[in-house]
Structures are given as structure tokens and as C-alpha cells.
Image: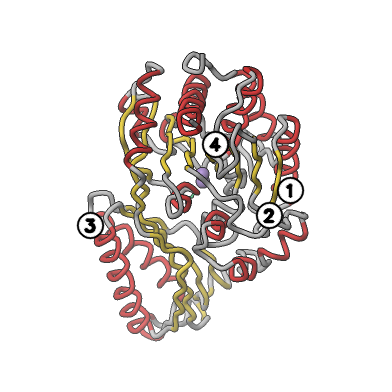
């Protein structure tokens, strides 16, 4: 009976679309930056659904939300979940699929009148994206004890606002102490956000590991001067330094090759005028690799380049690490469970690494963890055109259902 149980794809899509109305952007996609008014509305909607489904909802002091479904026995639940915050140019599925897929699993079990042996839990974690407040995966990092709560609450975002103040402003700070509830095992369903599954014609990814992530913020301070009269030899150009570094990053990752990727995604320059040499630039460098040694090499080469560049250009700089996570391998038995469940359901499946960061990589510190990926059309994500075919969404949630049932016995 449990093996033949299937989720309701139409109901899943309706919830995804409904949540996607909050923070909807012109032309599609959503903007629900962490702890924004849109995040507040999104939380309200998802918590409402959790209550309708009979889940016992608790919120911790970091704003992480847990919906518990009691089992026949007490004890730590089998947990699933993800995040509902998005980047500024987010799609409907990144994070949201993992949370709403979890709710769909719960509703399917409710309809079938099944009470699992272990309790189940559907969670969403605060500020997974890190687009407003660094580091990414902040809520789950605090939950697993990898960052002190006070440090997270004091973190300032790109707008100068503090996490703690924003949590209070949207009434998202809960009374439960962080680290609760305890967890038996964690499995996260997510869109791949890359091209591999689609290119391979495969429906399910059994995620074996998440690559290492290194985020650095660099601020250059030079001297403003007249663009026409200042000889090149007398310039202290913070704008040039930012762009030379961006070019260096691209050349560096090409040279390292393999899985190495690098991105300069944020740049702020001042006074930002056509005829003034810039005296200020601030930008970020996102470096990632599945191989930690190569990632360290890339970080070192970047640091050396910036030191020499600042020296040559006669400018000051400040360096801040915004995020640094080593590559994370998932529990092999958990990866096997995902692979077996996909095969049993008749889906094609491959083992693969994750290029994106996920809450699961934090949960892996405290319990057996793995992830289920479904294909992203054209490999596009963090883009309003992010799309996954409904049949693939449904396939992913059916795999999630079977893995959770398996883990709950
Ligand atoms: C989170 O989405 C990340 O991988 O940057
Ligand atoms: Mn995500
Ligand atoms: Mn994301």
C-alpha cells in the first residue's frame, strides 16, 4: 500500500504558484529576500498550510520554522525542508519546492490515513540564500550549532539592517531555543539549478556531495580625480582595481579548470560618474570547487593578486570573508536510499554533486543527510525564467515520499 502511494501533482503546483504570488516580479519569478515584508507574507502562507494539515508548528529564535507530524512513537523526526527566501531575481522553485514538496508528502499521508512510526517534520530555514545577509544557509547553520545565534542576529545585510532587528520587524523570531527539534535524518528535495540532469535525459539526481563555497568581499579605497586631467601615472583608481580583479577571477578559474567556478556578482562603485576616477569600489568574489585543495589555491592566488594590485595602484583595501564552507559529502546509505526509491518508482537516476549551497549541507553535520534533485530547464536558476516540468516536480516529490516513509520505519 505504501509503495503504491502517490502524491497529488496538481495540488503541489497550486501551492507553488500560490507562494509564487508573494513577491511576484513582472515577467515571472519572485523577489522574497530574507526577512523582508515579502518573506513575512510567505512565512504566513506556509505556516497557514502547515496548520491546515495538522502539523504542530514551532519557530526557533533564528526564525527557523518546523511543522511536526507525530508518529506512533516519540523521538526525533525524519525531517525534510528547505527555504522560502529567494534572491532578487528568484524563480518559483528554488527552495520552495523542498518545503511545499514536504507539505505535499504530509497531505498524501493524511489522505491515506497513515501514521508513520517515527514523527515527520517539514522545516524551512531562515536566510538560505545569503543574498541579503551573508553567509548563506545562515538559519540552518545556526540550527546545527555552526554559528552562535548572537553572531547571526548581529549580522548586517547589504542594506545595513541587522538580522535580529529584521526578524523582530516581521515577527519571525520564535521562542524555541535553536537546535530543536532534534532530527533523526534529513532529506531535501531541490531543483538541480544546473544543466546536468536535463543534458543527460535523467529525471532524478541522488546528490552525493555539495561543493565548497568561498565568498569574499573586497573594498578598494582610492582617490577621486578628474578623468581628463589626471595623468595615468598619478591615478589611484578603485574602479580599475575592481574590474581588474574581476578579470583576474575569470582567468584564474579558467586556468585551474575542472570544477572550479568564480563569480563577481555584486559591484558598487563611487562616485559612479563618467568623468571622475572612482575613489571607492566594493565587490564580491564567489569561488567554488568540489576539491577543497584547489579551492584553497584559488583563494590564495586571489589574495596575492589583490595585494600586488593595491600596491601597484597605490590604493587601500579591506578584505572580509562572507562565507567559507568546505565541500560536504552526504551519508552514503542516505544517497543509496534516494537512488533505490527513484529506481523503484521507475525513474532514471544518477549520482551527482551539487553546485549550489543548500541547508542539507548544514544538516549533514548532525544527522544522516542526502538530497534529491530534479531537472532545471536549460539549467537556469537565480533567474525569473527558472522552470522545472510538472512531471519532474511530481517525480521528485514521489521519491521524497518514499524516502521519508523508508526512513520513518
Ligand atoms: C545558494 O543558493 C547558493 O548556492 O549561493
Ligand atoms: Mn535553494
Ligand atoms: Mn538559491
User: Measured from the top left, where is residue 88 in percent x and y?
Assistant: 60, 48
Disc 1/disc 2 C-alpha distance (Å): 7 Å
Residue found 64% across the figure and 35% down from its top:
69
Q: Secondary structure at mark 4?
A: helix
Front residue of 276 and 91? 91
**Pointer 4 and pointer 1: residues touching (CB < 8 Å)?**
no
Residue 173 in view: no
* Other residues around mark 2 within 10 Å, as few (<14) / some (14–19) / many (≥20): many
Residue 188 in view: yes
Instruction: Judge whether 246 appears above or below 238 on screen.
Output: above
Give the colour scheme of this rendering: secondary structure
Question: Is 318 displayed left or right of 199 in the figure?
Answer: right
**Pointer 3 and pointer 2: residues touching (CB < 8 Å)?**
no
Front residue of 345 and 201? 345
Disc 4/disc 2 C-alpha distance (Å): 19 Å
**Pointer 1 and pointer 2: residues touching (CB < 8 Å)?**
yes
Disc 3/disc 2 C-alpha distance (Å): 37 Å
- Tell me the number on the disc at residue 35: 2
Q: Secondary structure at mark 3?
A: helix
Disc 4/disc 1 C-alpha distance (Å): 18 Å
Front residue of 195 and 83? 83
Task: Single out the mark in the foreground, 4 or 1.
Answer: 4
Residue found 54% across the figure and 36% down from its top:
98
Residue found 44% across the figure and 32% down from its top:
376
User: Measured from the top left, where is residue 226 in percent x and y?
Assistant: 52, 79
Earlier sequence position, callout 4 versus callout 2: 2
Earlier sequence position, callout 3 versus callout 2: 2
Q: Residue furthest front?
A: 73
* Other residues around mark 3 within 10 Å, as few (<14) / some (14–19) / many (≥20): some
Q: Which residue is mark 1?
A: 40
Amino acid at each position: 500500500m505504501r509503495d503504491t502511494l502517490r502524491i497529488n501533482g496538481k495540488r503541489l503546483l497550486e501551492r507553488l504558484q500560490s507562494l509564487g504570488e508573494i513577491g511576484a516580479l513582472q515577467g515571472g519569478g519572485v523577489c522574497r529576500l530574507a526577512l523582508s515584508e515579502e518573506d513575512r507574507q510567505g512565512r504566513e502562507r506556509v505556516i497557514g498550510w502547515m496548520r491546515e494539515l495538522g502539523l504542530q508548528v514551532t519557530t526557533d529564535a533564528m526564525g527557523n520554522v518546523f511543522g511536526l507530524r507525530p508518529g506512533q512513537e516519540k523521538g526525533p523526526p525524519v525531517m525534510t525542508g528547505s527555504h522560502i527566501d529567494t534572491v532578487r531575481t528568484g524563480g518559483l522553485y528554488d527552495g520552495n519546492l523542498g518545503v511545499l514538496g514536504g507539505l505535499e508528502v504530509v497531505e498524501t499521508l493524511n489522505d491515506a490515513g497513515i501514521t508513520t512510526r517515527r514523527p515527520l517534520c517539514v522545516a524551512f530555514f531562515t536566510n538560505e540564500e545569503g543574498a541579503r545577509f551573508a553567509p548563506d544557509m545562515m538559519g540552518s547553520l545556526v540550527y546545527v550549532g555552526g554559528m552562535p545565534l548572537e553572531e547571526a542576529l548581529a549580522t548586517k545585510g547589504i542594506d545595513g539592517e541587522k538580522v535580529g532587528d529584521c526578524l523582530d520587524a516581521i515577527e519571525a523570531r520564535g521562542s524555541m531555543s535553536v537546535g530543536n527539534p532534534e532530527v533523526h535524518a534529513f532529506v531535501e528535495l531541490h531543483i538541480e539549478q544546473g544543466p546536468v540532469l536535463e543534458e543527460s535525459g535523467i529525471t532524478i539526481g541522488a546528490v552525493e556531495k555539495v561543493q565548497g563555497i568561498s565568498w569574499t568581499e573586497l573594498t578598494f579605497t582610492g582617490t577621486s580625480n578628474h578623468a581628463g586631467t589626471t595623468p595615468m601615472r598619478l591615478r589611484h583608481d578603485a574602479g580599475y582595481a575592481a574590474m581588474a580583479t574581476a578579470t583576474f577571477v575569470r582567468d584564474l578559474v579558467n586556468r585551474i579548470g575542472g570544477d572550479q567556478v568564480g563569480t563577481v556578482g555584486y559591484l558598487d562603485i563611487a562616485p559612479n560618474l563618467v568623468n571622475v576616477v572612482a575613489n571607492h569600489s566594493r565587490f564580491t568574489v564567489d569561488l567554488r570547487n568540489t576539491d577543497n585543495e584547489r579551492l584553497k589555491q584559488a583563494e590564495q592566488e586571489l589574495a596575492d593578486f589583490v595585494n600586488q594590485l593595491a600596491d601597484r595602484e597605490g590604493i587601500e583595501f579591506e578584505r572580509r570573508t562572507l562565507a567559507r564552507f568546505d565541500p560536504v559529502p552526504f551519508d552514503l546509505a542516505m544517497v543509496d536510499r534516494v537512488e533505490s526509491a527513484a529506481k523503484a518508482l521507475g525513474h532514471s537516476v544518477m549520482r551527482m554533486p551539487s553546485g549550489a549551497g543548500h541547508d542539507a549541507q548544514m544538516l549533514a553535520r548532525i544527522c544522516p543527510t542526502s538530497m534529491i534533485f530534479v531537472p532545471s530547464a536549460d539549467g537556469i536558476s537565480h533567474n525569473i525564467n527558472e522552470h522545472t516540468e510538472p512531471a519532474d516536480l511530481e517525480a521528485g516529490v514521489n521519491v521524497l515520499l518514499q524516502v521519508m516513509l523508508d526512513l520513518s520505519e
